[in-house]
Amino acid sequence: MRYVVLIGRVFFTAIFLSSAPHHITKQYIAYGASQGVPMPGLLVPLSGAIAFVGALSILVGYRARIGGWLLVVFLVPVTLTMHNFWADPATAAVQQTMFMKNLSMLGGALLISHFGAGPMSVDELLKARAGRGGQ
């Protein structure tokens, strides 16, 4: 069962780790600008960095609770700004699906921010070492 949590962390973080590097591209920045993101040249790459650091933290399980909160900080504005399905009837169905996907990821991030990384994580290893007197 220990592997189930590790596999869950890998699957959960895959979307963030694969998409975050694209946040520095002209296309992502232009798309953010078209969706009304203020200061897109700064905020779009910054959001990618926040998502990447948060996901990496969860993946390896180092300070995963903080990583979970970083993903919350990333997901809330992105979900409300980029997937506002109520704004455009022409794209409402697709944007509502994306909104709900982000909502589910937000739930996962909140669970991790509360429970931590679980087994097979750096946090668990450090906790075990501290329990043995740091040996």
Image (cartoon, rainbow, N blue to C red):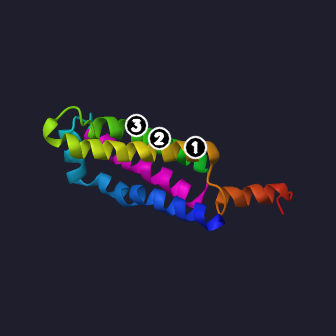
Q: Which residue is mark 3?
A: 76
Marks 1/2: CA–CA distance? 9 Å
Q: Earlier in the sequence, mark 1 or mark 2?
A: 2
Estimate the x, y position of residue 91 in percent, counting from the top left.
Answer: 17, 42
- Mark 1 neighbour density, 10 Å: few (under 14) some (14–19) many (20 or more): many
Magenta region includes residue 74: no
Q: Quadrant of residue 114?
A: top right
Residue placed farthest to the bottom in the image?
3
Q: Which residues are magenta?
A: 40-62
Q: Judging from the image, what secondary structure is the residue with disc 1 in?
A: helix
Disc 2 residue type (three-letter): Val
Whole-percent x and y of residue 80? 32, 35
- Residue name at image x 59 percent, y 64 percent: 4
Q: Find residue 113 and name its label.
A: 1
In the rendered image, the quadrant that contains the C terminus is: bottom right
Q: Which mark is residue 72?
A: 2
Residue at (36% x, 36% y) in the render: 77
| Mark 3: few/some/many CA within 10 Å (<14, 14-19, 20+) | few
* Cα distance in 3D space between marks 3 and 1: 14 Å
